[in-house]
Image (cartoon, rainbow, N blue to C red):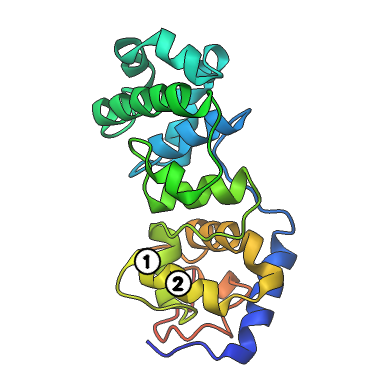
Amino acid sequence: MALMKPSVIPEFFARLKQAMPEPETELEYDNVYQLLVAVVLSAQATDVGVNRATTPLFKIVKTPQQMLALGERKLIGFIKTIGLFRTKAKNVIGLSKLLVDTHGGEVPHTHEELQALPGVGRKTANVVMNVAFGEATIAVDTHIFRVGNRTGLAPGKNPLEVELKLLKRVPEEYRLHAHHWLILHGRYTCKARKPECPRCVVSDLCTFKAKTVAL
């Protein structure tokens, strides 16, 4: 895969910005705690599936204290349609207890503290830092990993390589929203099986050789 020329990267993001001026996560939540729970539940699951499960859950659970009062067994009843629901339920109860015991019920603001919570890895921590606290982090999921490699924007063998390359190559003015632009571009245009190149706003800047010619 040919590396995208640094000179075209600002134009790449300018076009994504024009297409999506205010990109947002598609996970539904009312506060930072609910966002954290939703992101933990979203691992290897779709945002649509997570929202379907959390809509009734978040009507009665808005704090870690309320999650602990609900308990693991009842939590499973809400999230059993999501993959790995038993492990995720255990992690959600575990992180809720740690938030109450160690952080006064508040979600911490640092990568280190977030990643010390059960079920929270680097990607989840980056999402919370970006969405909740406005940090210019880039969480590399399957969509961003694919887009980074396929377009030549930030090729890498693993998510960390892609993340570090993106942090170097994305112009500072676009870094805050780069995460969402790339996820949404990968989800709806630069799709895994058949990218929709004919309607892609950055097709001419992308180094992908096997571009589709018809939808």
Considering the image in quadrants, where does the N terminus appear? bottom left
**Amino acid type for the residue under numbered disc 2:** Leu
* Relative side of 54 to 12, left or right: left
- Picture coordinates of residue 60, whole percent (x, y): 53, 11
Separation of marks 1 and 2 at Cα, in angstroms: 6 Å
The quarter of the picture where residue 29 lies is top right
Q: Which residue is mark 2?
A: 164
Foreground residue, 118 or 127?
Answer: 118
Residue located 63% across and 91% down the image:
7
Residue located 59% across and 70% down the image:
199
Residue located 45% across and 42% down the image:
114
The quarter of the picture where residue 46 lies is top left
Helix, strand or loop status at disc 2: helix
Foreground residue, 127 or 5?
Answer: 127
- Picture coordinates of residue 85, whole percent (x, y): 29, 28
* Relative side of 182 to 194, left or right: right
Dot 2 alpha-carbon crowd within 10 angstroms: few under 14, some 14 to 19, many 20 or more: some
Q: Which residue is mark 1?
A: 160
CB under 8 Å between callouts 1 and 2?
yes
Question: Is residue 48 shown above or below 157?
Answer: above
**Amino acid type for the residue under numbered disc 1:** Leu
Helix, strand or loop status at disc 1: helix
